[in-house]
Amino acid sequence: MENKKRDSFTGKLGFVLAAAGSAVGLGNIWRFPYLAAKYGGGIFLLVYLCLIVSFGFALMIGEIALGRKTGLSAIGAFKKLNSKYAFIGYLAAIVPAIILPYYSVIGGWVLKYLSVFVSGFGSAAASDAFFGGFITSAMEPVNWFFIFITVTAVIVVFGVQKGIESVSKVMMPVLVGLSIVIAGYSVCMPGALEGVLYYILPDFSKFSISTVLGAMGQMFYSMSLAMGIMITYGSYMKKDVSIESSVKQIEWFDTGVAFLAGLMIVPATYAFSGGDPAALGKGPSLMFVALPKIFDTMWMGHIIGVAFFVLVLLAALTSSISLMETVVSILCDKMKINRILSCVIVYLFSLGFGLVSCFGYSIWADITVIGMQFLDFFDFASNSVIMPVVALLTCIFIGYVIKPKAVVEEIELTGKFKREKLFTVMIKYVAPVLVVLILLTSVLEAFGVFRI
Ligand code: PHE
């Protein structure tokens, strides 16, 4: 047994900023605005908010409490509470191990775009062929990926307090500041008002079950749930910090930045595309193809472009740190090895798998897995399949194996658990049903049977 004291966050602020750093990521910046525009603006925001404070709240509370109660990362936590269920921890541990490499490949793309804008060549990035030319070249994406993952590893080597917490305390305020400035700039552009209204006002005619499913999938990913991250961060939390109020703050942070990202992107794309932001494509094409075009037409667009890619870089880095930390922490706990060795192992492993994702667009572009390129396949397997399964098992574990009371006790170490009833009902009855729905729709959608 290791008797060295486990590293911990210094207090509530450090914990909240680090966890918010994990939650606020690429998903907030490119995926949320796109989905909000697609699913009827304000009505999507409304549904999203309701889900965050109910379903998201319950799962996040549950995960953090599991970590803090046991003082262990995912595998150890499940095992300690009931050794028959350690397999849930193993499943949860696979998710960040799959996501980290390809997330870092995208982090590398962000670095590349930042360098292009910083060196004054933003206009080149606005051309149609630029993005395709970049990701299909054999070595360039590899180099940027290498830089990104190395920076992540260096921060993680420094540990919870000196690495993750101190970096989050600087990066997160800068990230919020930049979000406010860019969103402010974007809404003041000529013709933006119409787009702002489109984004904020609910269009009830667009409400459907797809709105709820879209919002649910997004919420899940955005809050970094069901991948052992919140369990790990919870295990570094001191016993005198309130979990309930920390979760509320993390949710505000995450939703606030997503909302601001919508204000940056929706009005601008709306004006640019003559009223149809969804027509500009989603995911990588929105961020790496459409936005550079818009920056190119904006007054001071190049400076906004630099600010925007700094913002995305910070968001991506704090998320990749949490992914790496989760895997490193599991290795340390499980194999009883030290942090440095564990970091080296995770780093080398991620380098290998990241290369596969890079080459999947270039020299191995002909190879696909169930019709998907490597990066898309890793994304699908982790987000659409394993994560919902882990979430379902976690709900069952808390709701029926250890019972909600075990979590409630942990929350009440710092005072009354105000939303205890909501938590219990959610974790036992509502969340499992919703999670099964997410799983079914995302798998059916991937195979083209269903379209949301
Ligand atoms: N929550 C992050 C986002 O919204 C995504 C993420 C996924 C972060 C996996 C860490 C791990 O982009």
Image (spheres, rainbow, N blue to C red):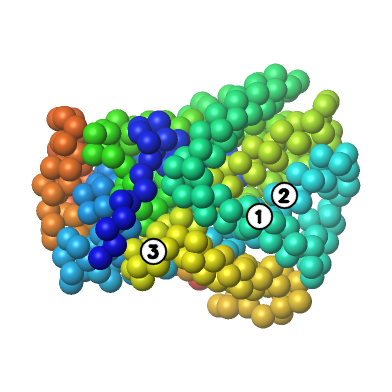
CB under 8 Å between discs 2 and 1: yes
Q: Residue at x 62, y 68 (%)?
A: 351
| Residue at the disc numbered 2 | 111
Q: Is residue 282 left or right of residue 53?
A: right
Is the shortest distance between ligand 1 and the CB of mark 2 under 8 Å?
A: no
Q: Is residue 68 left or right of residue 49?
A: left
Residue 60 in view in this figure: no
Q: Is residue 233 left or right of residue 62?
A: right
Quarter of image, res 101: bottom right
| Residue at the disc numbered 3 | 332
In which quadrant of the rendered image does the N terminus lie? Answer: bottom left
Mark-to-mark CA distance, 3 and 2: 30 Å
Of circles 2 and 1, the one toward us is 1
Q: Residue at x 17, y 43 (%)?
A: 410
Q: Of 378 and 33, which appears nearest the observer? A: 378
Mark-to-mark CA distance, 2 and 1: 8 Å
Quarter of image, res 177: top right
Dot 3 falls on a residue whose secondary structure is: helix
CB under 8 Å between discs 1 and 3: no
Of circles 3 and 2, the one toward us is 3
Q: Which mark is residue 102?
A: none
Q: Position of residue 126 (x, y in %)?
A: 84, 45
Please state which amino acid type lies under the numbered disc 3. Cys
Q: Is residue 170 left or right of residue 302?
A: left
Residue 234 in view in this figure: yes
The relative height of residue 397 versus residue 247 in the rendered view (above or below) is below
Please state which amino acid type lies under the numbered disc 1. Phe
Mark found first going from the N terminus, 1 or 3: 1
Q: Which mark is residue 148?
A: 1
